[in-house]
Image (tube, rainbow, N blue to C red):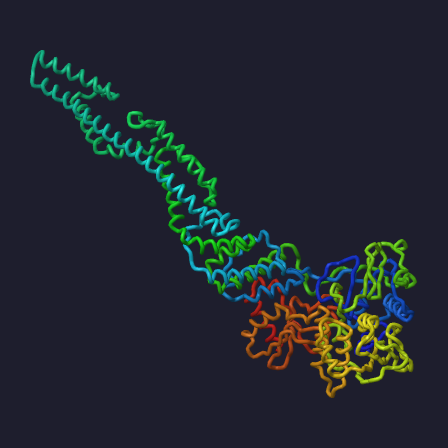
Amino acid sequence: MKRRIYQLAFKIMSNSLPFSSSTMTYTLAVTASSRHTAVRGAGKWTWALEQARKTLTKGGQVWIQAEAPALQKSITDWLKKTTENVIPDPGFGYEKAWIHDQIQPPAFGDYSLAATVGLWFKGMGTDAAALLSPFISTEGFSFTPKEFIDLRERLQTAIRRYERLPNVSRGLEDLNTGFFRHRSLEESQEFITERLSIYLNKGDDLHRDYLMKINRYTRKSIFSGRAQLRKRKEQLADISEVLSSAKSESGRVAKRARREAQQRWQEYHEEHKLTPAPDQPMEVQLNHELEDISKRQDQLFRDLQSAGLGLNSLTADPRFVDPTMLSSLETRLTDLIREVDEAGLYQLPLSGTEAATTHRQLLRLEGLLDKLRNTQRHLSELPDFYGRRHFWYAQPAHLRRLLAPLLNLPTSDWETAFTSWYFDRCIERWTKDHTPVLPASRQEAVDSDPNDTKTGRVVFVTAKGAKPGEMTEEDLFIALDAATTLRANLPCPSIRLAPLHDEEAVFVAVAGVRNPVLLFSQTFFPLTPPAWHARTSSIPPPGFPEGTILCQAANATEWIPISNWPLSASTGLHLFLPLLPTPADAQRLLEIWEYLISTTEEITFFHNWTPDDITQALLSDGFTAGFLSAALLRAAEAAEFEPFDRQALVALGQEILLRCGLPAPAPHPLAEHFGDKLKSYLPDHFFEIHQPWRDTFLPLVILSPTGKKSVLLPDGELPGHGTITTKKFRLRELQTAGFQLLSLPALDIWGDPEGELARIAEEVRRIG
């Protein structure tokens, strides 16, 4: 009974609509919402009418541009059925209007969080993946696919560049970056050479003058100190001699001699500004003074050296040097440093805190001279150094933050280290801004009574019949004619059903439909061929101008130009495709071909093409009526083979999708890279990445030795984004087919990749 309901619910025909009223739809990527939306793909009809049902449920009015009366009736019947709740929702029961899909915001461009974790996971386990610090600033990074590709290409260029360049020393790293950013090598070399010569000449002259002044001052100080100590020693010797004579005499002579010694001792203290010790005998003080003079002679050089460190124009002894000369030296040094800074020879300024002493000024001058001589010594390396730095400063500032540590690593590790760091930071930023949506969770439904909808509020108009003044913001305008241009002045949202080749439209696929013609409008793996036939007819049906594309219902006798064909379904259709259709008919075929093949159970293509004509048209460029006709004819031939040529049909479908800007989805990054590493945990299991299955691809399929099949879904999701009902239905289909479903939790894998590999491996073993 359930199978019968299932078949009824998803039968391809429902009056003249391309797909049944319970057909489910999903988009291939998260797209920004817009008031004026163009949609394409097999699910565009169902998706647009579902938006109409939601509008009616909320009390709005739906304006539909649909010329064919049969199509108007089909739309009205569909809306009535869905709002009266007579179509069962297979396996899940009826759900009220879901206004919002539970879609997790993307983490990297249109890549989901799980896909972004997969891009990061690719380098997981390699040493290079952990070589860049997670604390490098992310300021200036936008973490978009465009930025990633640009930075990776720049990095690859840098690898090739640095591998070719010879090694250089660090002797020129202090030069001003302006030489490498804004000047040519020749200009920089000429400027640096000229300035070095000027500054070294001035610096050497100044250095010589400093040494002469300091050394002369020191020499005079030494001789003066020695002379002073010699004089004091002589004075003490005379006093000692007088005291000795006083001891050898007696009476008045002795007293006179002692008074003389006392007088000289007092004069000695006054001359040398010493304080006598009255509590000690003169003889004892004299001996102490002699001992002190001997010590002073021994440390004279140390005392003068200490005094020389504090020498400046204020502390200098005028007897040994003119203080104004020291002031002149300081001024010349200050002028030289300012001149070097103003010339911009070095990146960092040399000026700073002024040196307070002549000795410190000399050290500062010698540091400047060392810097200039070092630059001059390494000047021969400037061409190679310039090549590196000129390339370096041509890179964006945020890339240079990554290049700086990468320069210390082997170039073979650069790309892996960068990629792992980039996606690691991208995921980290996403987790700060978003809360993960668990696969089992869902948003609140809008509580409304579907029986409140009145299909009388559906207004059918011609392409020019809609009057914006009669619309409100709660209404919806749907243009079924692919050639219609949506008007931006409409007060309400609008939807245009665009042809498959309109690359600006949002692509909407269908789920749960078994019709093999889907392989021409979305990725689909057919189990049976379409009921198509190809018949050669050298003579077209009579009575029509040459180049007219003709249609005929299988149970009718009259041919009708495709321009007059009513958009109504039939069990069978004859379609004549001339080799050279008129431009108007070619345009009409491109607009309605999806509708024709979707609403007709059996089609016979009549044509006057040769096999070479078909081959040449298939090899032509672009998506044209000629290419489309050739593809349909070749598909009809493949469908008639016994057994049918599935590979040819799939290849033709993929070529149509590719020319319409819809290439086949790539393998899911997380499934692909997680599966590669999971193989070592499950060596006796068979792995299949990106396996085609019905209207989707299974990200990762694992077959156990016992034959049990497991499907591993990144964050519990199949490719594409749909409503919760659609997601549940697609997963239920897999379970019905015998697959065991396991989720790959992206954030858990990001946080503990080794632990999740072991856990998932154990889950697969338990199933098998």
Across and down, in percent, residue 390 comes to: 50, 53
Drawn side of residue 278 relative to residue 556, left or right? left
Please, is residue 711 above or below residue 117 in the view?
below
The answer to which quarter of the image holds residue 579 is bottom right
Drawn side of residue 462 relative to residue 282, left or right? right
Please, is residue 612 above or below residue 130 in the view?
below
Across and down, in percent, residue 93 comes to: 80, 69
Closest to the observer, 621 or 371? 621
- Quadrant into which the N terminus falls: bottom right
Across and down, in percent, residue 501 comes to: 75, 68
Q: Pick out the residue farthest to the bottom.
A: 642
User: Do we see residue 162 in this rendering?
Assistant: yes
Drawn side of residue 609 relative to residue 432, left or right? right
Please, is residue 202 above or below residue 392 in the view?
above
Closest to the observer, 189 or 614? 189
The answer to which quarter of the image holds residue 195 is top left
Across and down, in percent, residue 378 comes to: 39, 51
